[in-house]
């Protein structure tokens, strides 16, 4: 990647996305559990309470590609396997990532950090952190930002629950499927759920759009490093969250995603986040600034020197405070509609 | 405006250059299909519709002939014969829709706009194509249509904002049959509307490397006394940096 960037703030492993099997009971089970989740998501929308989602889900997928599902175990294991796996190629020679994929564990959906679960009725189940770096599995927020995150949970509704786009990287951790298709010069990633979202990632070497253009899904540019698809995304509007628990970023974030085939049905997915407004960063950057150095308590705390002094009115916390009735009147109709892919439909028909 | 002018110029140039080459007969040709020329093809030999496209008309405001109003450019309609064969009760509803359009138009609520309306919204869209399906990614509210090729419609009734699209190739024309709509979308900002009995047949016929003739036949026995047709041209965005951005209507 470009060396001028500051080093990554943290890495997020949404878990992998496994190609959806087209036959057998497990596929149908997935379909039905997804349906239940969709229904549950609707229930959130209507009642503004939470959903039991990924807690149960994760238990049904303890092992993926021979690796343990929790990110800390999966990450080194899968990358090790990827070294010896030679993926098939598209006619123009790209490693073939095409297909319909789901995030079978999807633990990052409710919270990308360790999460004990919400005991209240309909609350989210527990989650194991998706963060592999820093090793404590916590987002390396600047102090003000950790407070903002708590504020998000206390007073704001997940933008996703308002059917706003999932943004990046949550697009890849979202439940239901996403279809990756590779073309000459670009790659498309189209999701079923999540405010009918898609990304067109250009791989033709064109520059990013101008910095004043802010997008929910960002502006993605891809290239190949060996068998790994690297997508660098900028121009994010910073209004989406990572999860349902208020973990956030700003419009200064850059995301670098890496997608590597581990076996024929598994992609190792990794995203590295870099957001100088919200996270702490490497000393080098601040060594050149006038910020005072603070005592180093960990690799990630070293740069905890820059805080935004003027707190804005939560531009990162979803679109606005919104009442349940407004939500039903204004936002719900037509916005959460699901796309159904052909394969998905085949599953559904068979189930019926 | 500059981009539009360039697109016009490019289209005109292409037309001039290719005029003498073997013309491709456009199936279902109408008065709008004036360009002849080489059609781009995929490796498999089917016409290649992939790219970023947009109309250059005022159908988003009114699909029929209309004079200018404040904020509304005048425009010649896209409906064949201009008149819509409304049933009497539907004609009254259309008038009421028009009178209340500032608030009644589903677009003002940021709903998905339905088909064919999304085609002529003032936003570009990107077509991607494989042997199995044609996908249209619209800039407007990230709408997506998966047009599956050679498979039957799902068994309804299901009410979908964008319907269920099934496509097939007829010569150079991609024919898309769309069913299973709900009754909550309009055809334009002027109150032209349909019911959940809507059946749309779209025909995408490339009439040059950068121009598609688009037709939509509308059938809705609850609202219209007979089928009717609209047609228009889709222009390829040829700017070097052309790409789909986003218009997330309900986020503003």
Image: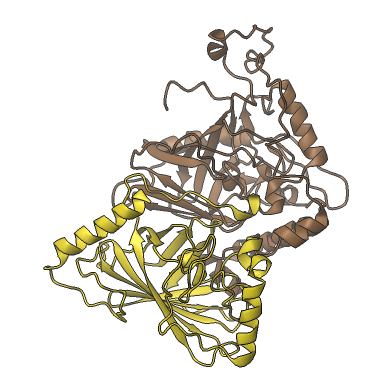
Query: Quick check: B233 left or right of A244?
Result: left
* Figure check: B92 above or below A260: below
Residue lying farthest left?
Answer: B20
**Visible in this render: residue A88?**
no
**Residue at position x 64%, y 32% in the image:** A131
Q: Which chain is yellow?
A: B
Looking at the image, residue B167 sits to the left or right of residue B94; the answer is left
Image location of residue A241, percent across then percent down: 66, 40
Residue A105 visible from this viewpoint: yes
Shown colour of chain A? brown
Quarter that holds the N terminus of chain A: top left
Left or right: B38 in relation to A165? left
Residue drawn at the location 26% of the way across and 77% of the way down = B26
Q: Residue A291, percent across and down?
A: 62, 9
For the point 58% across and 39% down, the residue is A237
- Give the camera-side residue of B70 and B142: B70
Quadrant of image for the C terminus of chain A = bottom right
Q: Is residue B14 shown above or below A249?
A: below
Relative image position of residue A117 (x, y in whole percent): 81, 42
Residue toward you, B1 or B147: B1
Q: Is the residue A310 above or below the residue A243 in the image?
A: above
Q: Residue at x 72, y 59 (%)?
A: A330
């Amino acid at each position: 990647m470009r060396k001028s960037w500051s080093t990554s703030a943290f890495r997020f492993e949404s878990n992998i996305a496994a190609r959806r099997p087209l036959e057998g009971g497990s596929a149908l089970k997935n379909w039905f559990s997804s349906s239940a989740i969709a229904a549950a998501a609707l229930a959130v929308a209507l009642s503004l309470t939470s959903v039991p989602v990924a807690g149960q889900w994760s238990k049904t997928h303890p092992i993926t590609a021979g690796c343990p599902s929790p990110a800390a175990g999966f990450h080194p294991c899968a990358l090790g396997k990827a070294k010896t796996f030679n993926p098939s190629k598209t006619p123009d020679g790209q490693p073939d990532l095409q297909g319909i994929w789901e995030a079978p564990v999807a633990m990052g959906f409710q919270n990308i950090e360790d999460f004990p679960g919400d005991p209240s009725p309909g609350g989210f189940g527990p989650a194991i952190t998706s963060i592999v770096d820093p090793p404590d599995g916590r987002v390396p927020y600047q102090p003000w930002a950790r407070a903002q995150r708590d504020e998000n949970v206390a007073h704001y509704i997940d933008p996703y629950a308002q059917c706003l786009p999932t943004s990046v990287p949550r697009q890849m951790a979202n439940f239901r499927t996403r279809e990756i298709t590779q073309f000459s010069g670009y790659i498309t990633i189209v999701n079923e759920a999540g405010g009918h979202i898609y990304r067109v990632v250009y791989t033709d070497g064109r520059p990013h759009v101008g910095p004043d253009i802010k997008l929910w899904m960002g502006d993605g540019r891809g290239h190949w490093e060996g068998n790994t698809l690297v997508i660098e995304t900028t121009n994010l509007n910073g209004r989406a969250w990572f999860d349902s628990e208020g973990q956030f970023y700003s419009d200064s974030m850059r995301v670098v995603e890496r997608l590597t085939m581990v076996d024929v049905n598994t992609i190792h997915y990794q995203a590295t986040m870099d957001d100088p407004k919200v996270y702490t960063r490497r000393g080098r950057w601040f060594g050149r600034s006038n910020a005072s150095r603070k005592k180093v308590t960990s690799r990630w705390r070293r740069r905890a020197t820059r805080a935004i002094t003027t707190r804005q009115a939560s531009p990162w916390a979803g679109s606005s405070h919104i009442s349940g009735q407004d939500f039903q009147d204004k936002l719900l109709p037509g916005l959460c509609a699901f796309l159904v892919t052909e394969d998905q439909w085949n599953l559904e028909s068979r189930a019926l | 405006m500059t981009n539009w002018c360039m697109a016009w110029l490019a289209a005109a140039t292409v037309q001039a250059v290719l005029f003498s080459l073997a013309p491709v007969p456009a199936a279902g040709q109408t008065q709008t299909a004036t360009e002849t020329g080489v059609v781009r093809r995929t490796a498999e030999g089917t016409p290649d519709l992939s790219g970023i496209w947009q109309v250059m008309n005022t159908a988003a405001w009114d699909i029929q002939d209309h004079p200018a109003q404040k904020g509304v450019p005048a425009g010649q309609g896209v409906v064949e014969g201009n008149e819509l064969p409304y049933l009497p009760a539907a004609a009254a509803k259309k008038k009421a829709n028009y009178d209340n359009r500032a608030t009644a138009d589903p677009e003002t609520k940021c709903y998905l706009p339905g088909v064919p309306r999304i085609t002529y919204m003032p936003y570009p869209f990107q077509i991607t194509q494989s042997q199995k399906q044609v996908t249209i990614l619209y800039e407007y509210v990230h709408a997506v249509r998966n047009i599956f090729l050679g498979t039957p419609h799902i068994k309804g009734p299901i009410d979908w904002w964008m319907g269920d699209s099934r496509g097939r190739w007829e010569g150079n024309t991609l024919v898309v049959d769309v069913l299973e709509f709900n009754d909550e979308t309009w055809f334009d900002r002027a109150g032209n509307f349909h019911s959940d009995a809507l059946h749309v047949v779209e025909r995408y016929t490339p009439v040059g490397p950068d121009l598609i003739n688009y037709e939509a036949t509308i059938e809705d026995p609850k609202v219209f006394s007979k089928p009717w047709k609209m047609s228009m041209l889709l222009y390829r965005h040829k700017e070097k940096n052309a790409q789909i951005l986003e218009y997330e209507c309900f986020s503003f």
